[in-house]
Image (cartoon, rainbow, N blue to C red):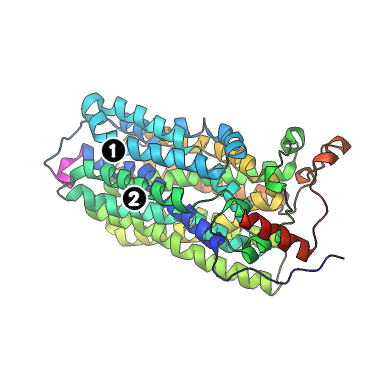
Amino acid sequence: MSVAIENTGPFIGIRHLQAALLFFAIVVNYIARLNVSVAVVAMTDAATSNPDFPEYNWSEAQRSYILSSFYWGYIITQFPAGFLVRRFGAKLVLFIPTCATAVLSALTPYCIGWGGWVAFSVLRIVMGLFQGLIFPCIHEHLAKWSPPKDRNRLGVFAYSGADCGSVLAMAVSGLIANSSLGWPGISYVSAGLCGIWCVIWLLLGANNAPSSRLVGLDERLYIERSMKRNDGFHDQKIPIPWLAIWTSVPFYALLIVRSAQGWANSTMQLQTPAYMHGVLEMDIKSNALFSALPFLAMWCMSYVYLVFADIAMSRQWMSLTTLRKSINTISYWGPAAALIGIGFLDKSQTGLAIALMTINAGLNAGSGIGSILTIIDMSPNHSGMLMAIVNGVGNIFPLLTPLLVGVIVTDPGSRSQWQIVFALTAIVFFFGNLVYIIWGTTDQQPWDAVDFLGPRDAEHQPQSQLSLEQAKSKLKSDKDI
């Protein structure tokens, strides 16, 4: 007779180390991805940074091409990433884009000096191609290492790396541009950080608990059995139920709400420095520091949302679906209202504009718990592939929004033109979340089952759960080997 497992593994274990590695992976890659918004301002206005480096006379349209070029490559590799991580595991697939980002960042100043904005755009496209592999890997890795009880904590901590990376990209880039390193130093620092992470990842990263040399017996048993994963699970090749996925209403609700987030992210992350420089007339140093404040608020607030979610679930205040929808509603509709208000402010109200932008971003921090982790809830077996689809489609909008802003904002100092940009983003926020409220769910979908495709796949299913003593004996023998 099977014996119930009481242990929950060590309080701090290797699963937490893996989440920390994912956190820093996102941090270093986001720094390399987002520092372009500050770097472009420094390159085109030498008076706002170290004047000892070249200045380029790029038009607003050319700057928009540079800002959007990353996403032209980024969306292409999202879908292949889902297949690659299933085939080779997250350790290898996550190492490749981070290593490539380090190399490309180091080459950036030379490419710009050689080919101007065109070479810069091409390099950003290539960087996007590599970084498109990252988030499907992150999601797949979390699905393999995160027991349901720890999923909110580990998932929010890992994804908060995006907020930390955004803070550092905005704040540190401005300081570097004003230093003796100038704007080329922004790329060199990014390259160094990515390289350091790659070395640490190769030493400490592992695709799953069974393949880790560091995980203890109790923690490995806790992770595997809490997710009902028995011996042989990680070697299974579970077919992807494409028809069921593409005819799933909850999946489309998730796709729409994440696309809305992609639109908003690109507007706030890439356009904030241009808005503050043009409308609020701030210099690049203070511009970069204040541009980082909203993302600092996001980073801090993500943990506030996490504490609330833990308390709400432990005290059973609401179901998981209700919790995620409630947090997501605050994260979307609050910022939508704030964006409308920002559009009515000018340079005489700089403090209020910065405050509203900070509140906007802080409220939006709940989107991680609100909708990103829903992918794992709905389908832990196919989370990497679903993330590849959702992130791929969602990032079509970051590709288009800089181009749209370039069309709308012909005069960077025009408040009325920026009002249109912020109003459009608020509308997208509102309707994206409304769809999620009506049709979204955290229920594990029928098509996620191993035997969903029919009886012919029954032979590939895992055997019935081992007893506790059998499992421990098996795991111990594996460790000895």
The answer to whether residue 357 is left or right of residue 46 is right
Q: Is residue 45 magenta?
A: yes
Mark with earlier residue (1, 2) = 1
Disc number for residue 106: 1
Percent from the top left, x then y, of residue 19?
A: 52, 57
The answer to whether residue 317 is left or right of residue 42 is right
Residue in front for this viewpoint, 81 or 56: 81
Q: Disc 2 marks which residue?
A: 169
Query: Tag 1: residue type?
Result: Ala
Asked if labels 2 and 1 touch by Cβ distance under 8 angstroms, the answer is: no
The answer to whether residue 126 is above or below residue 206 is: above
State which region is magenta.
Answer: 44-51
- Label 1: element kind: helix
**Quarter of the rendering containing residue 383:** top right
Percent from the top left, x then y, of residue 50?
A: 15, 46
Query: Tag 2: residue type?
Result: Ala
